[in-house]
Image (cartoon, rainbow, N blue to C red):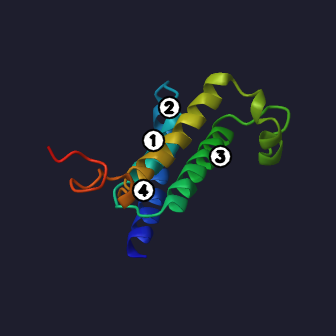
Amino acid sequence: MKQSLLVIVGAVVGGFLGYKAFFWIAGEGFYGLILPGGLLGMGAGLARNKSLPLAVACGIAALALGVFTEWNFAPFKKDGSFGYFLVHIFDLRPLTLIMIAVGGAVGFWIPYRQIPDSPRRSSPDQNSPGQNDA
């Protein structure tokens, strides 16, 4: 339970820093929409994660944060509401969608790689049946 709480706190702090870093970098003339989701995943990955559902939740949160950040940065001119933005999200440029997706993938992958290997995925024992003892 304590580890899960540390993962969540790390994700929140990382997501906040990624959100702020995106706007800082955008003010300098760069477009780094991977930052919110990516830093969310990096923050979550600071603590050892033992839960696949928690890694999936971090990935979904990273996607949602990427969408929310893009909406705050560049809402549609016709209607600036978040609902309109969600309905027309596929009207965004492909690079924007790719950056949101990569941020979500990083947000999932970093906490996921912290999950310890299960006994089934470890190498077989030296004395297991079927191996030659030559």
Determine the CA span between mark 2 and mark 3. 14 Å
Amino acid type shown at disc 3: Phe
Residue 68: mark in rendering: 3
Element class at badge 2? loop
Q: Which numbered disc, 4 or 1, marks the residue that appears first in the sequence?
A: 1
Q: Is 108 on the left-hand or right-hand side of 121? A: right
Q: Given this view, does label 4 or label 2 mark the residue nearer the observer?
A: 4
- Disc 4 secondary structure class: helix
From mark 4 to mark 1, how far is it between C-alphas?
17 Å
Q: Secondary structure at mark 3?
A: helix
Circle 1: is it few (<14), some (14-19), or many (20+) Cα within 10 Å?
some
Residue at mark 4: 44
- Marks 1 and 2: in contact by CB < 8 Å? yes
In terms of sequence position, does the residue under pointer 4 or pointer 2 come before the other? 2
14 and 28: which is toward the camera: 14
**Residue wearing tag 2:** 32
Q: Secondary structure at mark 1?
A: helix
Foreground: 70 or 133?
133
Residue drawn at (43%, 76%) of the image: 1
Q: Residue 99, image x and y in percent?
A: 56, 31
* Residue type marked 4: Ala
Q: For the residue carrying disc 4, how many other residues have a C-alpha within 10 Å: few (<14), some (14-19), or many (20+)?
A: many
Question: To which quarter of the image does residue 88 belong?
Answer: top right
Residue at 60% across, 42% down:
66
Could you give the CA–CA distance between mark 2 and mark 1, rounded to whole angstroms?
A: 9 Å
Mark 1 or 3: in front is 3
Q: Residue at x 60, y 29 (%)?
A: 98
